[in-house]
Image: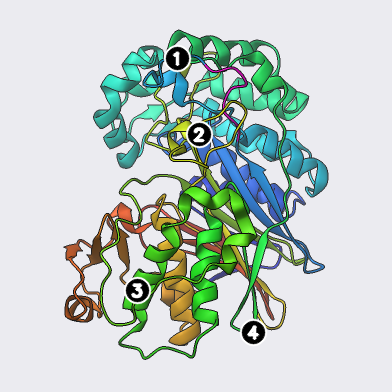
Amino acid sequence: MLSRGALGAVAAAHPAAVDAGLDAFRRGGNAVDAAIAAQASLCVVMPEACGLGGDSLCLVASPDGLVGAVNGAGAAPLVSVPGANDPGNTVTVPGIVHAWGALTRSTGRLDLAADLMLPALLASEGVAVGRSTAAAVASQRERLIAGGGNRWGLLQCTAGELWNQDALADLLKSIGFDGPDAYYRGKIAAAIGAAVQTHGGSLGERDLAEHVTPRPRPISVPWDGGRLFVQPPMSQGVLLAMAATWFEAREAPDSGDLQHLGVEAVGAAFEHRRRVRHGESLLEVELDVDPHTASHRSGPRGYLHTAGIATADAQGMVVSSLVSVFDDFGSGIFVPEGGFVLNNRAEGFGEAPNDPFPGRRPVHTLAPAMVLDANGRPMALATPGADGQIQSLLQVLLAMRYEGVDVSSAMRRPRWRSENGQVLIEEGHPATSGFSDRGHVIETIEFGDQRFGAMVAAGIDETGPWACGDERREVASGAV
């Protein structure tokens, strides 16, 4: 169900993030301010998925119909050291805080202190530890302790218990008043470097001080009379554009073929994942899709995480964004001076041309999307799920285009996830027998399993801003 308002609308991975975004609207902020406030709140309440030690990737549709990208992801250290298996070597420069500064300066209506005020208050007054957070702590406790987390109050909390984060609150306030330099230079930068180097890595103060937030042009392809925009490299978003381009070039498929074709198009696109840095040139690749028989490609991998935020305001600005530390609690390396853990995004490196190299950004799973319909009205779509992001987004787009359902209905439908040659299917999926008939190896999974993502959406229509959230996980939406 859509949430509609006069000022703006927010959908996010947690209700506290929705509240923060709506507060930004009430104080005169726009969709960018609401997105920053929501992202920062997620860093407070969902540290297993995101945090100040991680990244943020955004697409921003402005009221004039232009769409821009913000690549809030960092690079590998400029100087590498041996010992690739050490946790410290999995850390890339965290990009989220610098991205907030870039967004505020270029597009926000409030200042960064205003955007971060409620998230800082949330951290200082305390939040109830969520069940998913507590479960992640239980599964990652040994790794967190090894990373210095024995000093982190979270490890002493149980689900539902109030958890105060004074160090994080103080850091958020400092970033608000002093800007990103409060993070990328001085005490916190030194603490990040010390934590990484203690655990075998080389990232240091120079890497942080020289970090920049690229603003590359999004990749855009025709879609259903409008255009689909995806995050450019190093995001995997181009893989969604490749699959969408394959469908765009063909007649509408029979309803019985649609899901099979989706699986095969995704599998064919993911064969080019390591070449993501080639960007738009990949759109010229003709995907090898068998319309009748399963290919059993190894395809997408079986990991997940991340949190989504989508916002829209009455002036016509829409933001699609994702925040992440990659794996649960990222590298597991804790920075007590700031109360956060560092990412392990360097695990995204692989075969050439996505091989590790000093100063290089790895292929990134975060893939927010934006659709401009035939009337130029924007809609933001984003979901967690690592390699599942492209798949969930494609399924929602296909349902809206070929089955004529609205975005909220498309989100509620059971999903599939292609993974390592199998197709995982949420129970109740109507295409189960069709998958079997075409030779897919299927496994039925309980509806709402986190492997199927947790979509957020927001946009503008003839009545104004709207937002809606998935029924999966703790996703919520609201409007003012």
Of badges 3 and 4, the one in the foreground is 4
Q: Which stretch is magenta? A: 74-80
Q: Nearer the viewer, residue 305 or 344?
A: 344
Q: Secondary structure at mark 3?
A: loop
The x and y percentages for residue 434 are 22, 81
What amino acid is found at the position of numbered circle 3 in the picture? Arg
Looking at the rendered image, the disc whose residue lies closer to the viewer, 4 or 2, is 4
Amino acid on which disc 2 is placed: Val
Of marks 4 and 1, which one's residue comes earlier in the chain? 1
> N-terminal of the two: label 1 or label 3?
1
Q: Is 79 one of the magenta-colored residues?
A: yes
Above or below residue 392? Residue 408 is below
Marks 4 and 2 sit apart, C-alpha to C-alpha, by 40 Å
Tell me the quarter of the picture where residue 416 sits: bottom left
From the viewer's perspective, tell me whether residue 381 is left or right of residue 134. right
- How much space separates mark 3 and mark 4, taking CA atoms? 24 Å
Q: Quadrant of the C terminus?
A: bottom right
Mark-to-mark CA distance, 1 and 2: 34 Å
| Amino acid type at image mark 4 | Gly
Q: Which mark is residue 225?
A: 4
23 to 299, vertically: above or below = above
Q: On residue 44, which mark appears?
A: 2
- When asked about the image quadrant of residue 464, the answer is bottom right
Q: Dot 3 corresponds to which residue?
A: 413
Mark 3 is surrounded, within 10 Å at the Cα level, by few (under 14), some (14 to 19) or many (20 or more) other residues, namely some
Q: Of discs 4 and 1, which sits in the foreground?
A: 1
Chain-order first, disc 2 or disc 3: 2
Contact check, label 3 and label 4, Cβ < 8 Å: no
Q: Earlier in the sequence, mark 4 or mark 2?
A: 2
Q: Nearer the viewer, residue 380 or 38?
A: 380
N-terminal label among 3 and 4: 4
